[in-house]
Amino acid sequence: MSIAKKLLGQTAAYGISSIVGRFLNYLLVPLHTLIFDKEAYGVIGGLYAYVGFFNILYIFGLETAFFRFANRPDADRNKLYNQVLSFLIVSSIFFTGLILIFLDPISKLINFPNQKLYIAWLAIILAIDAITAVPFARLRLENKPLKFAGIKMANILLTVGANLFIFLFCHQVYLGNFLPELKPLISKIYFPEWGVGYIFLINLIANLLLLPMLWRELSSFRFDLNFSFMKPLLRYGYPIMLMGFAGMVNELIDRILLLELLPPDFYPDTSVKGALGIYNACYKLAMFMTLTIQAFRYAGEPFFFSQVKEKDSARTFAFVMKWFALVCTFIFLFVSLNLDIFKLFIRRSEYYPGLGIVPILLLANLFLGLYYNLSTWFKLTDKTHFGTFISFGGALITIILNIILIPRLGYMGCAWATLACYFCMAAACYLLGQKYYPIPYPVVSILAYLGLAVGLVILAANVPITDIIIRHVFHLVLCVLFLIVVWLVEKPRFIKM
């Protein structure tokens, strides 16, 4: 239990930035969906989809490699830090330079010819993200979650504050809704025609400010690049990078394929970019699952590496998996049953036709979280190539199903493809893990709880209750019923512990 408490404490500390910080960032969704129509919101989703892929390329899997090599008995952590950071500085400048040189053909290739300036800003953001990834990894390695969380939170608050200033204060003053005497001044810094461009500019400025925030970590850096030294790290990291690419295919390729494959007249009152805007906005409602998984991953990766030599590590991993799955299952149940409330997070009703994808995406992300937990075995045994095979298998499923389903089901096809992909990845990872690194995961109980939650969601969807209050009470009763079942089943184990 003390080990579990340690992991829970670290998860909570990192969650200050990952959950609270990102939640604040997600609170911008109501503001953005109020200011921008679904076509403009589609531009945001489309460009950031490409950013996800390039983020993986820029880091080369070296963040995980840094953790792995730093935990070896003979590791020289300072030299390792200098080498990895030196490599990423050189490679990031190179890639960003290429994007800036070929900006015009790139913008046309990805079907955003009028957003070249935004793409240039995003190229600089990618370089900063890659360079700051190593100092952030060092903070995690040195068990400094409060500093890590403080810097991440400051970055989020700057981003949120700047968005509120531009899109709430400046926008309203410009429209003359209040403080009309400030309009001449605001007109010099706020240009409505920039539209979504402010989102990318704010992101760039906030990321630039990470450099002085990490000054202590960066000031101890000494440029030292030795390719012989880096070779084993790159050999370890490139399967992680390939997995990352495959992961981005699973997570983001649906946005790109939706733009390419959706018939123009599929939705009578919505353009293709508008459909992407709807999908992108409704996808945000899966954030509660995503944030939980992200917070767990920040603490989980260094935790699992540190516990591998412990006598009861396998039982510890199984214990952690079970309760992680239970938490995620309850999130799936609670959000799915209360979509009438959570949909208010999106301010315009023109986005509501896509709400049907939310339970599917919540369940998909639950299986993704299980996969991350199950992937412990190939990271601890240095068999990361298995992760590459699984991820590419998932990517193949995603691409094939999106190609088949998007012309027939629209963005609902994207959601079903995502669920199928993550389920297959989790299943494959479990089966291979039991062969090469057996861990006694309580699969039956996890699937039983998940099946109960899915059944309750289906039950709620098929019980027609027109009165809003009675419907909400009924849904809350179903959530409490799930918790009662968990308590009754797990109570003897708690008493025993």
Image (cartoon, rainbow, N blue to C red):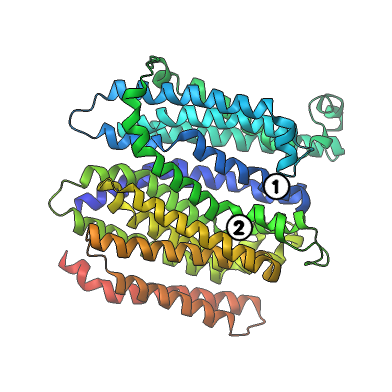
Residue 31: mark in rendering: 1
340 relative position to 186: left or right: left
Q: Secondary structure at mark 2?
A: helix
| Percent x, y of residue 147 | 39, 31
- The answer to whether 76 appears left or right of 17 in the picture is left
Which corner quadrant holds the N terminus? bottom left
Q: Amino acid at mark 1?
A: Leu
> In x, y percent, where is residue 370?
38, 60
Classify 126 as above or below 48: above
Question: Of label 1 and label 2, which has the lower sequence position?
Answer: 1
Q: Position of residue 476 (x, y in %)?
A: 50, 73
- Above or below, 328 against 54 in this view is below
The kind of residue tagged 2 is Tyr
Tag of residue 3: none
Q: In percent of the image, x 49 and y 51: which residue is there?
A: 247
Which residue is at the front of the view, 481 or 294? 294
Say if mark 1 contacts mark 2, CB within 8 Å.
Answer: no
> Residue 495: where, in percent of width, then height?
18, 68
Residue 482 falls in image quadrant:
bottom left
Local packing at callout 2 (Cα closer than 10 Å; few below 14, some 14-19, many 20+) is some
Q: Nearer the viewer, residue 484 or 395?
A: 395
At mark 1, the secondary structure is helix
Give 341 or 405, whichever is nearer the viewer: 405
Q: Which residue is mark 2?
A: 283
Q: Residue at x 61, y 35 (%)?
A: 159
Numbered disc in front, either 1 or 2: 2
319 left or right of 42 in image: left
Task: Answer yes or no: is residue 322 visible.
Answer: no
* Residue 7 shows up from this direction: yes
